[in-house]
Amino acid sequence: MFRYPKIKGLIAAVFTPFTPDGKIHLDLIPAYANRLKNQGLAGVFVNGSTGEGMLLTIEERKSIIEKWMEFSDENFKIIVHVGSSSVEIAKDLAAHGEKNGVYAVACMAPNFFPSSDLDVMVDFCQQVASSTPNTPFYYYHLPAITGCHIKVNQLFKKASGIIPNLAGVKFTHTDYMDMHQCMALENGRFDVLHGHDEILINGLVLGIEGAIGTTFNFMPGVYHSILNAYSDQNYALARSLQMKSIQVVEIMLNHVNAIVGGKAIMNMTGLDFGLCRSPLRNLTIEEIKRLRMQLEEVGFFDSIISLDGIK
């Protein structure tokens, strides 16, 4: 079994930019990548739910990862999500990721014919991970979307002996008992990456050191400040900063979902990511105006986003 170093800091679950005619906008990625690097992000999570990965073609997913890999370095990790309802597609994408030198591969459970059978999920993960044997493999736990309701600590127990490159989990769930159990297994062998931006502080209590999030794209300064305040044992400040996150996340979620609302917010920060792909419903002009107004009311443009130097 391999024991990989744990990821520390903030990983942005990146959006996929589209041109007005619905094609992926690869030419926007350099400006996007440089912004995130300048804001101190530790890397990106590509083709995940935020990136509409399941709505992209296989070739689109491959071309996006190839473009992001141009910005990979020791301090900026590229993690690719390869999940699919087809295990063969997931294996193909995983092998492609390793061929292109990604830092890690992640895979959520299939959401067509979803299964909460632990043995089925261990087998699924083993097949995908075996296609990328020299790269850390992370299970992406997102039961609200996949319908796969398993205990990740049980998956780790069953899989650790047969998936040598099993590194950890992107844990996007509120079962903190399961999260705590994952962190305690095999003397802390597994890397548990927090996946809920609005309750990051809850993970810090358990000892989380790394996180992957959607709102890290447009307000990472808030989360850097939460990490610093918690490290300095200034828990009142950490809670206050977390509430700023909660205010923005609540507004975002009230505008269809995190992908639609989040991309609309990202478009307000100076980079035009275009619309979301069908079947996601994009916001109307009136909804976008209301979104901006609500963000202004909580000081998003004046105080929250200014932490990152974006005007």
Image (spheres, rainbow, N blue to C red):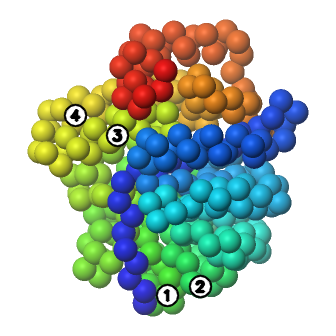
> Which residue shows up at 13% across the image and 45% down it?
232
Tag 3's secondary structure?
Answer: helix
In front of the other: 100 or 242? 100
Position above or below: 127 against 84:
below
- Residue 206 picture quarter: bottom left
Task: Identify residue type, mark 4.
Answer: Arg
Q: Are marks 1 and 4 in contact (CB under 8 Å)?
A: no
Left or right of residue 179: residue 138: right
| Residue wearing tag 4 | 239
| Residue wearing tag 2 | 133
Tag 1's secondary structure?
Answer: loop
Q: Residues within 10 Å of mark 3 (few under 14, many from 20)?
A: many
Task: Identify residue type, mark 3.
Answer: Tyr
- Residue 270 picture quarter: top right
Precedes in sequence: disc 2 or disc 1: 2
Q: Are marks 2 and 1 in contact (CB under 8 Å)?
A: yes
Q: CA distance from mark 3 to mark 1?
A: 33 Å
> Which residue shows up at 40% across the image and 24% down it?
306
Precedes in sequence: disc 3 or disc 4: 3
**Residue 194 visible in image:** no
Q: CA distance from mark 1 to mark 4?
A: 38 Å
> Which residue shows up at 30% across the image and 34% down it?
242
| Residue wearing tag 3 | 223
Q: Position of residue 148 (x, y in %)?
A: 56, 61
> Which residue shows up at 73% across the image and 30% down it?
274
Q: Position of residue 268 (x, y in %)?
A: 59, 22
| Residue wearing tag 1 | 164
Q: Position of residue 168 (x, y in %)?
A: 43, 70
Task: Identify residue type, mark 2.
Answer: Pro
Q: CA distance from mark 2 to mark 1?
A: 8 Å
Precedes in sequence: disc 3 or disc 2: 2
